[in-house]
Amino acid sequence: QVRLVESGGGLVQAGGSLRLSCVPSGRISAIATMGWYRQAPGKQREWVAVITRGGISDYGDSMKGRVTISRDNDKNIVYLQMNSLEPEDTGVYYCNVQTLMTVTSNALDLWGQGTLVTVSS
């Protein structure tokens, strides 16, 4: 099964920006959605952004207006540009890819191991 590898996290001051990347270890067929989630310590995982196979994007309320999701269709890479970061944005950010069931494969729900984002005040 293909793996998702997130990168781009790190330590940033409040008001700063980061660009996260999610790179699959191999080719992914029949992608339905690609998205980003985050989880702060002691809290539930929260949806941040999604982009569909048709290129339609949507965002969760917590970071709407401060993040932009984009993708490289040829390489199946998904990005999350984050601006105006706040200490409350601190957490582990996870990449998620969902695929469609096809004649030759099951539907998949893939998760990366996450990349840590720490926003200092």
Image (spheres, rainbow, N blue to C red):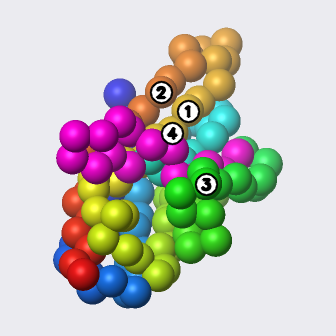
**1 and 2 marks in contact (CB < 8 Å):** yes
Residue 61 is labelled as 3
Q: CA distance from mark 2 to mark 3?
A: 23 Å
Looking at marks 4 and 3 on the same chain, the residue that comes earlier in the sequence is marked by 3
Q: Secondary structure at mark 1?
A: strand
**Mark nearer the viewer, 2 or 3:** 3
**Mark nearer the viewer, 4 or 3:** 3
Residue occupying the point 30% across, 71% down:
87
| Residue type for callout 4 | Val
Residue 97 is labelled as 4
Q: Which residue is mark 1?
A: 98
Q: CA distance from mark 4 to mark 3?
A: 20 Å
Q: CA distance from mark 1 to mark 2?
A: 5 Å
User: Which residues are drawn in magenta?
Assistant: 38-52
Q: Residues within 10 Å of mark 3 (few under 14, many from 20)?
A: few
Is 40 situated left or right of 21 in this image? Answer: left
Q: CA distance from mark 2 to mark 4?
A: 6 Å
Q: Residues within 10 Å of mark 1 (few under 14, many from 20)?
A: some
x, y percentage for residue 54?
79, 48
Residue 109 is labelled as 2
**1 and 4 marks in contact (CB < 8 Å):** yes
Which of these two is toward me, 116 or 97? 116
Q: Secondary structure at mark 3?
A: loop
Q: CA distance from mark 1 to mark 3?
A: 21 Å
Q: CA distance from mark 1 to mark 4?
A: 4 Å
Residue occupying the point 63% across, 40% down:
33
Residue occupying the point 36% across, 64% down:
89
Magenta stretch holds residue 112: no
- State which quadrant residue 17 falls in: bottom left
Q: Secondary structure at mark 2?
A: strand
x, y percentage for residue 109?
47, 27
| Residue type for callout 1 | Gln
